[in-house]
Image (tube, rainbow, N blue to C red):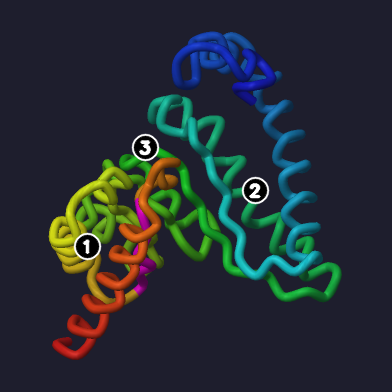
Amino acid sequence: MKYMIENASSGGPFANHARKFLVEHPEASHQLLTMITDVVVKHIVHQVKAGAQIIQVFDPYAGDMGPLLFSEFDLPSLRQIAKNVKDKLRQINMEPVPMIIFAKKVPYAIEELSKAGYDVVALDYCVEPRRAREAAGNVTLQGNLDPVMMFGTKDEIQSAVKEMMEQFGTQHYIANVGLGLLGDTDPDKVATFVDAVHTCSKYMNASS
């Protein structure tokens, strides 16, 4: 919606034109979001029909809306996407695939997202794992190592992974970074991250 109201080159995250539009034209905003939601649902269903085994819905500007606007405009659409995708797949006799919701920078909405119909809630690197676990209950969480940690030493990466995983715990958790990897990330550092996850997982599971 941001790119429709503004343009791809507009300055600032979720710049003020889009935010103002939500407040000044709430009915039109809901209508537009409904149209976008319908298109997203159709696209996801086609992805699953083409062989996708898991889907992640990424909402990069969620946090720039603020709690009130997110709750009124964004969250209902995210709920509808999860529900409608599963309904559409069942209508064509296909089993729903696991769905991940990644709404960036909305720590205040983790509990609501955990009840929005998704199988996994992905977290950005600004979220404290223990608070996220308390808010999400038994819903699976994904994340949330800061991608810049990939520029640290091997020992620093291993230490960061250990601290992250100890906070998330051994159940209902997918280890990942808390946003996309930077373009100049060394692949060997990514391998260090993956190896550290496996090592920590084995140790934590053996100790539990």
Q: Nearer the viewer, residue 63 or 114?
A: 63
Q: Locate the C terminus and report the quarter of the image it occupies.
A: bottom left
Residue 187, x across and y down, in percent:
40, 57
Residue matched to label 1: 161
User: Is 101 left, or right, of 90 in this rendering?
Assistant: left
Dot 2 amino acid type: Gln
The Cα–Cα distance between marks 1 and 3, rounded to whole angstroms, is: 21 Å
Nearest-to-viewer mark from 2 and 1: 1
User: Is 122 left, or right, of 136 in this rendering?
Assistant: right
- 183 is higher (above) or lower (below) than 129: above
Residue 137, x across and y down, in percent:
32, 64
- As drawn, the label of residue 52 is none
Dot 1 amino acid type: Val
Q: Secondary structure at mark 2?
A: helix
Q: Of marks 1 and 3, which one's residue comes earlier in the chain?
A: 3
Task: Give the quarter of the image for residue 140.
Answer: bottom left
User: Is 99 left, or right, of 90 in this rendering?
Assistant: left
In the rendered image, is residue 110 in sight? no
Residue matched to label 2: 80
- 97 is higher (above) or lower (below) than 179: below
